[in-house]
Image (cartoon, grey):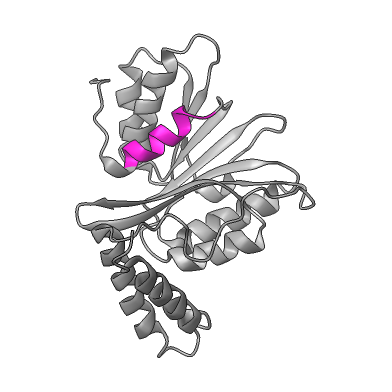
Amino acid sequence: MNHDIQLGKRLGAIAKLITQHQPYDHIWDCCCDHGYLGTYLLSHFSKQNKHKVQINFVDQVTHITEQLCNKLKQSPFSHYEVHTLDARHLELTKNKRHCIIIAGVTTTGTLKILQTLLNQHPNQDLDFILCPTRGQYDLRQYLIKQKAHLIEENHILENNRHYELMFVRIYGNNDQNVCKQVSSIGKFWQKNNAEHLSYLANRICHYQQEVLDPSKHDALEAVQLYSKMHQHICSTKI
């Protein structure tokens, strides 16, 4: 098994977020697919002698987890566990620090996982790294309602696809003061950044189409916010 895994831009950004922050007791790589991210993290944390982190690979597709188990058995790593289950049903031990990664899933799927986990673990402080394939605006509205604390956010362009990466903490105690709130469309935008302008144009076009659907109540507001930001960062003044 090759442990020198080269991650792509998106997974590399997620790995960087985790390894730069305080160590967790458990990291959950949900909907892990081939397990590249989790294996990279296993290799990284195996070199840290101070704190042992358990990497949890989670996927509900049996043949994926079976193949992953076989690969990991050939590795020198021991601080891991492979779970064949729906990510909504993670067993999050109390009094332990958990970071839950949900990437490569639509916002609909991401929200189902988030809502269930928060309902099942109402008194725990949980960190989430979220990178949905689409529907970021709806996810942000949910995080705002949950009073999520924003640790870090970024925009990533990989293989001509736009992603928003959000690292948030949701406190079990709703009275906890949130230092930095999640915003409706993000605050990572940079003036005259071609990638950001392209992404904003994409979002505007998408939500202009959704305005025609009566069930999409927030579509008009989304169009207005993205349009205003597009106009702002188009400024010739930097």
Drawn side of residue 231 relative to residue 3, left or right: right
In the rendered view, would you say 220 is above or below 44?
A: below
Which residue is rendered at x = 54% and y = 54% of the image? Answer: 113
Task: State whether residue 143 appears in this view.
Answer: yes
> Of all residues shown, which one is farthest toward the top?
49
Q: Report the magenta stretch's main SS.
A: helix
Give coordinates of residue 142: x percent, y percent: 58, 64
Quadrant in which residue 30 is drawn = top left
Q: Residue at x 40, y 26 (%)?
A: 41
Query: Residue reaching furthest right?
Result: 175
Q: In this rendering, does residue 64 appear at all?
A: no
Q: How many marks?
A: 0
The quarter of the picture where the N terminus appears is: top left
Question: Is 114 rendered above or below residue 69?
Answer: below
**Which one is nearer the viewer's eye here, 17 or 135?**
17
Depth check: 185 or 71 in front? Answer: 185
Residue 148: image x %, image y %? 63, 53
Where residue 62 sits in the image (x, y, percent)? 38, 42
| Residue 165 vertical position relative to residue 202 in the rendered view, above or below | above
The stretch drawn in magenta includes residue 196: no
**Foreground of the two, 7 or 231:** 231
Judge by depth and name the residue closer to the eye, 139 or 229.
229
Task: Determine which quarter of the picture holds residue 63.
Answer: top left
Q: Residue furthest left?
A: 159
Which stretch appears magenta? 11-21
**Quadrant occupied by the C terminus:** bottom left
Q: Position of residue 95 (x, y in %)?
A: 72, 30
Q: Report the residue at 68% width, 41% height from top.
A: 125
